[in-house]
Image (spheres, helix red, strand yellow):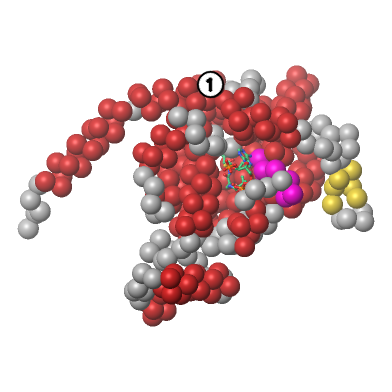
Amino acid sequence: MYTQALDQLPIEHSAQGDALRQQRFDQRMAAGRTVEPQDWMPEAYRKTLLRQISQHAHSEVVGMLPEGNWISRAPSLERKAILLAKVQDEGGHGLYLYAAAETLGSSREEMVDALLAGRAKYSSIFNYPTPTWADVGVIGWLVDGAAIMNQIPLCRCSYGPYARAMIRVCREESFHQRQGFDLLLAMMRGTEAQRRMVQGAVDRWWWPVLMMFGPSDTESAHSANSMAWGIKRISNDELRQRFVDAAVAQAEVLGVGLPDPELRWNAERGHYDFGAIDWDEFKRVISGDGPCNRERLAARRAAHEAGAWVREAAAEHSRKRASRPHAA
Ligand code: FAQ
């Protein structure tokens, strides 16, 4: 508390004051201490965080759609209850993340408007369709698996509200991943047709999942700054490699193949080598031209419009409460 109070000593607005603020920020970074909303931060750091956290929030919310597609068609009451809880968790993650982003000075309304207007990005992965029940399992196993791999280091991110949100998100994602794996295991122990369905879903999702980690390090526009600022702790390529290494062993337990003829253990590197990612496809998807981009945005816009009366009612309720005299 004592050092926090020192950090907040007012510094006069002048070139010298700016240099001092920057110096304190740099010292904080070097000491590995978190930055909190009340702390001074460079504008570029704030913007980078706002971009990443709001994109992450949008991803969680848009990410409810592919699996939500199966809630009404889950094969048993138990699977339906699990899927409902899982999709609801993703909505909750979106809310924690919007709240974390709001601490950086943007309103939820501005962020949602940017998404609905097509100005804001969300994860490429949610622009792929879910034609079979096995897709639900593969999303849990591979998509949540990749999300965890990427998000565990974010629990140590330099911005306090983001790091704290990530701790809870990661705990829940790890349940999500297990439910996906369990669903697929049940199908793999079922009929030949079910096993084919699982393999088909793995074949469709494998490459898009590898794209979730973002462009290769040499192409990544934001990595250098984000690493220097302790937002990113591990690079896009390194996380992708760790994910491939973990997924191969899990695929063996499941008894599914991974659709990459170049996938093989490299004893020298101590990692699996894997084939080339289709970056043209990635660029198409993140620029709005993936298989389901239009459908996903249309669904979000319709949900936003349909929910207008709820927002109005909640605002009116809170206005009334605020105008009531306080109870003694
Ligand atoms: N999709 O310079 P970099 C989940 C963009 S949550 C779309 O490397 P950065 C849970 C990037 O924004 C999944 N765009 O960028 C769940 C930038 O564009 P900009 C989401 C992408 O930020 C599971 C440009 O490319 N997770 O799955 C993608 O340093 C199941 C240059 O890239 C997060 O958001 C992409 N895949 O690194 C929910 C985690 N990759 O902004 C439901 C937090 C890159 O300049 C069901 N985010 N771009 O226009 C991150 O860790 C980072 O933002 C990266 C990208 C690693 C995604």
Q: In this view of the protein, which residue sits in the foreground, 90 or 215?
A: 215
Look at mark 1 in the image and give the residue it sits on. Answer: 295
Picture mark count: 1
In percent of width and height, residue 153 lies at 62, 57
In percent of width and height, residue 267 lies at 92, 54
Q: Secondary structure at mark 1?
A: helix
Disc 1 marks which amino acid?
Answer: Glu
Side (left or right) of 37 relative to 125: left
In percent of width and height, residue 23 lies at 51, 74
Q: Is residue 158 above or below residue 292?
A: below
Say whether residue 186 is magenta.
no
Side (left or right) of 38 relative to 236: left
Side (left or right) of 207 relative to 153: right
Q: Quadrant of the N terminus?
A: bottom left
Q: Is residue 178 visible?
A: no
Which range is magenta?
212-218
Q: Is residue 52 above or below residue 161?
A: above
In percent of width and height, residue 305 lies at 35, 24
Give the quarter of the image for residue 146.
top right
Task: Give me the residue at 57% from left, 58% from top.
Answer: 231
Q: In this view of the protein, which residue sits in the foreground, 51 or 154?
A: 51
Say whether residue 216 is magenta.
yes
Side (left or right) of 282 relative to 261: left
Q: In this view of the protein, which residue sits in the foreground, 152 or 79?
A: 152
Give the quarter of the image for residue 143.
top right
Callout 1 environment at 10 Å: few (<14), some (14 to 19), or many (20+)? some
Task: Give me the residue at 51% from left, 46% from top.
Answer: 51
Task: Give me the residue at 46% from left, 63% from top.
Answer: 41
Q: Quadrant of the C terminus?
A: bottom left
Task: Say if disc 1 is inside 8 Å of ligand 1.
Answer: no
Task: Give me the residue at 36% from left, 74% from top.
Answer: 11
